[in-house]
Amino acid sequence: MGAHKRPSMMSRAGAASALTLAAVGATVLVPGGATGAEASTVATNALHIAASKQGSPYQWGATGPYRFDCSGLTLYSFKRAGKTLPRTAAEQYNRTTHISRGDRERGDLVFFVSGRGVYHVGIYAGDGKIWHAPRTGAVVRLERIWSNSVLYGRVD
């Protein structure tokens, strides 16, 4: 009796992973493509972790793994990727290397400012978008940066 072949179907988890990778613009490693070291940086890993939390509810003060506030999502994502960040967005800004808009890369932190204070943070996903936990009643999502009053920081 010959081997029975089942139709090739992605598992639900596989489909979610593929969608997450597509959403963050991941590249497939092929000759001439991104190097293994470039594709596996802490920041890139943190970005993928944040994207994997898409749909998780916002909760003030929450640091995961199922609910997040803005700095809780960044703290959780970088911790899982191997780096420790302080708890609040302002403290996280103070702990990063400050970079210009032109130097931003996927996985850098985007800090929203009002006056002299940082009030929100997300992880840069490329193409002017961030993964973030926006506010009460919302969920972790990919969203276009809506303000010019932002600063950028790189986690060392």
Image (spheres, rainbow, N blue to C red):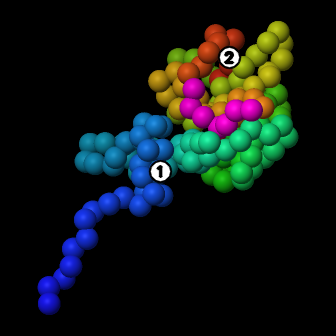
**Local crowd at mark 1 within 10 Å, few (<14), some, or many (≥20)?**
few
Q: Earlier in the sequence, mark 1 or mark 2?
A: 1
Residue shown at 65% from the left, 37% from the top? 140
**Local crowd at mark 2 within 10 Å, few (<14), some, or many (≥20)?**
some
Estimate the x, y position of residue 12 in percent, counting from the top left. 45, 57
Q: Quadrant of the N terminus?
A: bottom left
Estimate the x, y position of residue 2 in percent, counting from the top left. 14, 85
SS state under label 1: helix
**At label 1, which amino acid type do we have?**
Ala
Residue 33 placement, left or right of 110: left
Residue 87 appears anywhere in the view? no
SS state under label 2: strand
Residue 151 appears anywhere in the view? yes
Q: Which residue is mark 1?
A: 16
Estimate the x, y position of residue 149 in percent, counting from the top left. 69, 11
Q: Residue furthest bottom?
A: 1
The magenta segment is 137-143
Residue shown at 44% from the left, 44% from the top? 19
Q: Which residue is mark 2?
A: 150
**At label 2, which amino acid type do we have?**
Val
